[in-house]
Image (spheres, rainbow, N blue to C red):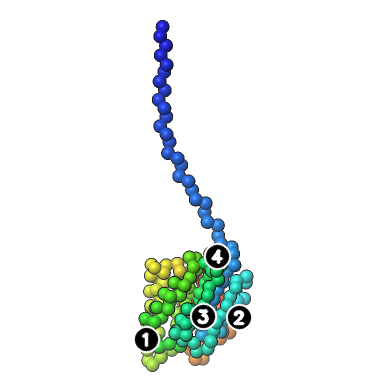
Amino acid sequence: VRLRAARTQAAAPQPAAPSRLPAAAPYTGPRTMIVIGDSLAVGMADQLRADLPGWYVVVDGRTGRALGEGARILAATTLPAGSRGSHAILAFSLFTNDMPTNVDALDAVVRASVGRLGAHGCAIWATIARPPFGGVSYVAANQRLAALARDPSLAGRLLIVPWKALYDSHPSWRAADGVHATPEGYAARAELYAAAARACAA
């Protein structure tokens, strides 16, 4: 009797299970918010700091500040280094003191503000609420801000505070000149900026 060794067919090698990268842990480090603005920034500064406890909030505001001066301050601003700088937020309260037809300049500064940020930072701007200047309204400026927020190249990096619509719908927020705010209005404006900052930081 001859015994024959049974031939066992080797099992086909199984593909290795794809390795899964661990999910990135939420950032819990320090938060920085730098505000560059005009009298509306001055008016909301104290409340904004109160609305963001634990944040490092710097407000550089001056009554009458125009977009060009704000752009120069932006260019000279040094963001924090390291992870804190990566998650920094730049906020702006500008263009209320500019000609409403200067929309292309507004576009350029908004884009420059996003370009200054780290990988996880955001730029916050607000729509303009004020009477027409020289018979020209600020509708085109607000439309451009809305269009920039929809720009794929700025997606998730640019947040627009709907100040114009909310200011118009809350008479108790409006000062007599139709530009500045009452204490209630400044508190509301600060909370809008703080909510945008928290949304970016999430």
Asked if disc 4 and disc 3 are in contact, CB closer than 8 Å, the reply is no
Residue name at image x 52 percent, y 89 percent: 63
In the rendered view, tell whether residue 158 sits above or below residue 176. Answer: above
- Gap between marks 3 and 1 measured at Cα: 21 Å
Mark 2 or 4, which is nearer the eye? 4
Would you say 146 lies left or right of 199 here?
left
Residue 46 shows which numbered tag? 2
Question: Given this view, does label 4 or label 3 mark the residue nearer the observer?
Answer: 4
Mark 3 and mark 1 lie on one chain; the one further toward the N terminus is 3
Mark toward the start of the polypeptide (2 vs 3)? 3
Spot occupied by residue 95 in the image (x, y as percentages of width and height): 45, 84
Quick one: label 4 or label 3, which is nearer the N terminus?
3
The residue pinned by badge 1 equals 101
Instruction: Tell me which numbered mark, 4 or 1, is placed earlier along the sequence.
Output: 4
Structural crowding at the residue carrying mark 3, measured as other residues with C-alpha within 10 Å and reported as few (<14), some (14–19) or many (≥20): many
- Residue 139 position by quadrant: bottom left
Q: Position of residue 98 (x, y in %)?
A: 43, 87
Q: Is residue 133 left or right of residue 28?
A: left
Q: State the CA–CA distance, disc 2 to disc 3.
A: 14 Å
Q: Which residue is mark 4?
A: 83
Q: Residues within 10 Å of mark 2 (few under 14, many from 20)?
A: some
- The structure residue drawn at horizontal position 55% and vertical position 73%, both measured from the top left corner, is 33
For label 1, the SS is loop
- Pinpoint residue 155: horizontal percent, then vertical percent: 42, 67
Q: CA distance from mark 4 to mark 3?
A: 22 Å
Label 2 or label 4, whichever comes before in sequence order: 2
Mark 3 = which residue? 36
Residue drawn at 55 percent across, 82 percent down = 60
Residue plotted at (42% across, 11% down): 3
Q: Residues within 10 Å of mark 1 (few under 14, many from 20)?
A: some
- The reply to whether discs 1 and 2 touch (Cβ–Cβ < 8 Å) is no
